[in-house]
Image: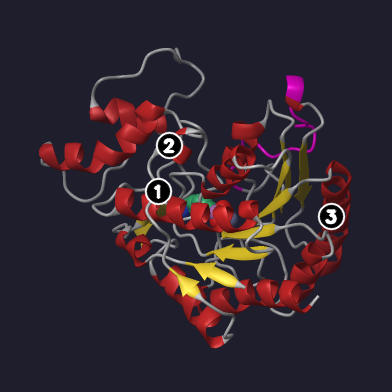
Amino acid sequence: MKTYYSRKQLEHNAAGEFNRGAFVQAFERPDRALSVLAAVEAAHFGAIEAPTEFSLDPILRIHDAAFVKFLQTAYAEWKAMDRPGDALPMMWNARVFREDKIPESLDGRLGYYSFDISSAIAAGTWDAVKAAADVALAGAVDISSGREKVAFSLCRPPGHHAASDCYGGYCYLNNAAIAAQYCRDHGANRVAILDVDFHHGNGTQQIFYSRSDVLFASLHGDPKTEYPYFLGYADEKGKGEGEGFNHNYPLPRGTDWDAWNAALTAASKVVDTYKPDALIVSLGVDTYKNDPISSFKLDTQHYALMGQAIAKLGKPTLFVMEGGYAIGELGTNAVNVLKGFENA
Ligand code: OKP
Ligand code: ZN
């Protein structure tokens, strides 16, 4: 299996994040990518390649142009105002305001374009998130052209929380959505996105919610108790043209492999019935029992079973790396999914 990876992705390095009232080391840090890279190397999976540089066009098929411009300039604007540290929002548009005004000031735009405080814009953020989108696109080229049946895009930072014009949850550009759209624009009539990250992929859901050409199915912690709290319920089925093409499987805290696998079987049926030309897997392994910010109970050996089940769908498949914060075991768990897929 071919892996795409870019060192530029290490350049996003937040000074820290707020967690439970304390400013702590960022959970989403450069070491995450290195953990996965080391495990891919140790598995002797085949070529590990840097992506070619794509233009902004495939990103702008998914994201709003002013939003992308904002991501490109926000850090420099922050520094031009002599602010310390990374660019962080201090206020959000919380239902009680009007939504048709984009503020001029940077503080206003930080609040307008984000949904949480955990996603700093630091010096290298734009270069890293652009590289991650390129990593996803390189994999999309391979599977949409038929050159490869499967590929792994080792993206970092993750992407599935990023909506068309909103960032948050450590996500800035939606790598999986950008890859899915690329496949749509290059021969695939239908694309399915299967999101196995612990957290609901609210960004991916929002992007494709009114569309029938990209199906979204997600297994995740129940938003009643888990981040991102405001989306991911089972009654979110899609709207208009997209009605019936969005499938959420919220699961309770403490969910173990058997219960998780039952939901995977249900989601797999939905994907299979859809008959996609390509499958994108938003591969988060923060379902792991020792993940520091999640609450499922999957163990290392279960990830190979997950890969096996995904292989059974028999589709050209692109794995796009999302979350996973138990950095010691992150690489092993992610690569176990790929091994399970390969050995199926
Ligand atoms: C990203 B992905 C407070 C907790 C913030 C953000 C979780 C983002 C997860 N510091 N939680 O889905 O793995
Ligand atoms: Zn996650």
- Quarter of the picture for ligand 2? bottom right
Judged by its main secondary structure, the magenta piece is loop
How packed mark 1 is, by other alpha carbons closer than 10 Å (few <14, some 14-19, many 20 or more), is some
Magenta span of residues: 227-241
Secondary structure of the residue carrying numbered label 3? helix
Disc number at residue 57? Answer: 2
* In the image: residue 22, left or right of residue 196: left
Q: Is residue 5 above or below residue 227?
A: below
Mark nearer the N terminus (3 vs 1): 1
Secondary structure of the residue carrying numbered label 1? loop
How packed mark 3 is, by other alpha carbons closer than 10 Å (few <14, some 14-19, many 20 or more), is some
Q: Is residue 141 above or below residue 187?
A: below
Amino acid type at circle 2 is Asp
Q: Residue at x 54, y 72 (%)?
A: 326
Q: Residue at x 66, y 64 (%)?
A: 150
The image's colour scheme reads secondary structure
Amino acid type at circle 3 is Ala
Q: Nearer the viewer, mark 2 or mark 3?
A: 2
Mark 3 = which residue? 263
Disc number at residue 239? Answer: none
Residue 188 placement (x, y as % from top left): 69, 43
Disc number at residue 54? Answer: 1
Name the residue nearer the viewer: 221 or 271.
Answer: 271
* Residue 164 visible to an observer of this rendering: yes
Mark nearer the N terminus (2 vs 3): 2
Q: Nearer the viewer, mark 3 or mark 1?
A: 1
Q: Is residue 114 magenta?
A: no
Q: Which quadrant would residue 26 be assigned to in this image?
A: bottom left
Marks 2,1: beta carbons within 8 A: yes
How packed mark 2 is, by other alpha carbons closer than 10 Å (few <14, some 14-19, many 20 or more), is few
Mark 3 CB lies closer than 8 A to ligand 2: no
